[in-house]
Image (cartoon, rainbow, N blue to C red):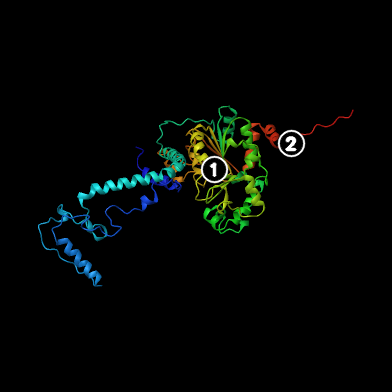
């Protein structure tokens, strides 16, 4: 055991787990059913369910209650004649008609029959729900795998013993030496809005929103889609150019050491920079396809572009529902591809580069905990992000960290290069000696000068 304090640490861990809707495990019909033994319709007649009570005792009592109700009078309790019938607490039973809201107990003689009926009902429900559950299985399993890795790392439950120190020194220079060594072959980059800032992406405040996040809130979109489509026109692919950060990511690919690029952004600047589509995971969706939010009919990028640039609110040609680009809004599930590749990519990662993100949006932020425990992690950002709670830093001798251990005395792999994201990427290029290759990516070739004869 790790000793005292693990309870508090576990509570802190659980508070960091994001609130994400899991696929439904029970149908509405199942969850809405009242507990067995409670009446939901008028009681069956005594002829249908004979009771073991002495003749006349329960029937007379019920008749008295019924007559009083018909007359509009309050029914006075009717005392049953004393008999030798055992009390319920002594193993006796009451009539089926007095179960549930009336307060009686269930007749044990009918339990098997009721349970059999319930099983048949449940079987029918489960058959009805099989199709819905199958659709969500992959996302559910992907998230559960990510959550399992998070908890294993947090509680140090993995059987890895002493963690190997990969970096000669826990500095930017140490990261550069590691890349130059040739041992680094599977880099994963995680990017946020910071890599696109210099491209001139507009501030959301210009769109007259009740709060900045509203433009990506699915409920706000349903009630007022116009702000989103105004933004979509401003952001539409082709309106902006890649930044130095995007070209750096492309250079990693050209060097053959980029395993995957995970981005929260929807500006598609990675594609404009020439990064192949199979290398990009757009965690928050894409403009390349669109669907009706009502009937799920799919629409092409060209169709959506035409509607947006006509300043129309795109509506479905079949059901008149709103058509939305396949961008993940708040309260929507992330793409299946995100969960599929996350499970296979991160265990292979030998260097994680975190670029221009505050690491506050889940489950994207949790990905930093899915790399191997020895994998170096370099943050390039204006400020520190993703750092563990100070209390967790103190507990690091008992528990493995979640988040970046930038300020921990036991840190052996996490490095921060603070400042403008573009500047940080250019600095790395210079330190790696890649400047010439880097500039070739975005500098058009010079035309050959004509020589005079």
* Side (left or right) of 251 relative to 72: right
Neighbor class of circle 1 (other Cα within 10 Å; few <14, some 14-19, many 20+) is: many
Which of these two is toward me, 212 or 164?
Answer: 212
Residue picked out by circle 2: 444
Which residue is more in the foreground, 115 or 318? 318
Identify the residue at the far front of this view. 47
For mark 1, what is the residue? 283
Is 285 located above or below residue 33 in the figure?
A: above
Of badges 2 and 1, the one in the foreground is: 1
The image quarter containing residue 65 is bottom left
Q: Which residue is outermost to the right?
A: 453
Res 245 label = none
Q: Where is residue 276 in the image (x, y as percent from the top left)?
A: 62, 35
Question: Element at badge 2?
Answer: loop
Q: What element carries label 1?
A: loop
Image spot of residue 414 (x, y percent): 52, 37
- The part of the image, by quadrant, that contains residue 272 is top right
Residue 57: x and y in percent read 14, 61
Whether residue 96 sits left or right of residue 268 in the image: it is left
Q: Are marks 2 and 1 in contact (CB under 8 Å)?
A: no
- Residue 235 location, x and y as percent? 64, 49
Q: Please identify the quadrant where the C terminus is shown.
A: top right
The alpha-carbon separation of the residues under discs 2 and 1 comes to 31 Å
Marks 2 and 1, the one that precedes in the sequence: 1
Q: Which residue is drawn at 24% across and 46% down?
A: 112
> Does residue 80 lie above or below 217 as drawn?
below
In-front residue for pair 77/181: 77
């Amino acid at each position: 055991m790790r000793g005292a304090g693990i309870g508090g640490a576990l509570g802190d861990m659980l508070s960091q787990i994001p609130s994400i809707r899991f696929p439904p495990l029970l149908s509405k019909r199942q969850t809405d059913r009242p507990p067995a033994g409670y009446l939901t319709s008028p009681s069956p007649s005594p002829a249908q369910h004979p009771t073991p009570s002495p003749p006349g005792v329960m029937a007379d009592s019920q008749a008295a209650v019924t007559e009083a109700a018909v007359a509009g009078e309050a029914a006075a309790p009717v005392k049953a004649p004393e008999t030798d019938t055992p009390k319920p607490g002594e193993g006796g039973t009451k009539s089926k008609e007095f179960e549930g809201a009336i307060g009686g107990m269930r007749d044990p003689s009918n339990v098997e029959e009721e349970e059999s009926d319930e099983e048949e009902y449940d079987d029918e429900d489960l058959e009805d729900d099989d199709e819905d559950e199958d659709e969500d299985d992959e996302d559910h399993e992907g998230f559960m795998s990510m959550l399992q890795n998070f908890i294993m790392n947090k509680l140090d439950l993995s059987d890895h013993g002493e963690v190997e120190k990969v970096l000669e020194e826990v500095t930017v220079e140490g990261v550069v030496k590691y890349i130059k060594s040739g041992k680094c072959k599977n880099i994963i980059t995680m990017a946020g809005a910071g890599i696109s800032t210099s491209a001139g992406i507009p501030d959301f405040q210009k769109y007259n929103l009740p709060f900045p996040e509203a433009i990506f809130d699915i409920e706000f979109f349903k009630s007022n889609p116009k702000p989103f489509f105004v933004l979509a026109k401003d952001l539409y692919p082709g309106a902006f150019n890649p930044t130095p950060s995007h070209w750096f990511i492309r250079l990693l690919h050209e060097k053959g050491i980029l395993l995957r690029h995970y981005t929260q952004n929807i500006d598609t600047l990675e594609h404009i920079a020439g990064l192949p589509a199979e290398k990009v995971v757009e965690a928050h969706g894409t403009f390349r396809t669109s669907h009706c939010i009502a009937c799920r009919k799919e629409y092409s990028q060209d169709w959506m572009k035409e509607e947006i640039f006509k300043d129309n609110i795109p509506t479905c040609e079949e059901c008149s529902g709103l058509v939305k680009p396949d961008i993940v809004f708040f309260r929507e599930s992330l793409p299946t591809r995100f969960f599929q590749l996350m499970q296979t990519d991160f265990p292979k990662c030998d260097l994680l580069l975190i670029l221009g993100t505050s690491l506050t949006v889940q489950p994207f932020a949790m990905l930093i905990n899915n790399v191997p425990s020895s994998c170096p992690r370099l943050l390039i950002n204006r400020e520190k992000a993703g750092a563990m709670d100070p209390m967790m830093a103190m507990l690091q001798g008992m528990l493995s960290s979640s988040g970046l251990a930038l300020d921990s005395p036991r840190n052996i792999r996490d490095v921060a290069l603070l400042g403008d994201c573009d500047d940080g990427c250019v600095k790395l290029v210079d330190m790696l000696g890649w400047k010439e290759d880097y500039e070739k990516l975005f500098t058009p070739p010079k035309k050959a000068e004509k020589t005079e004869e």
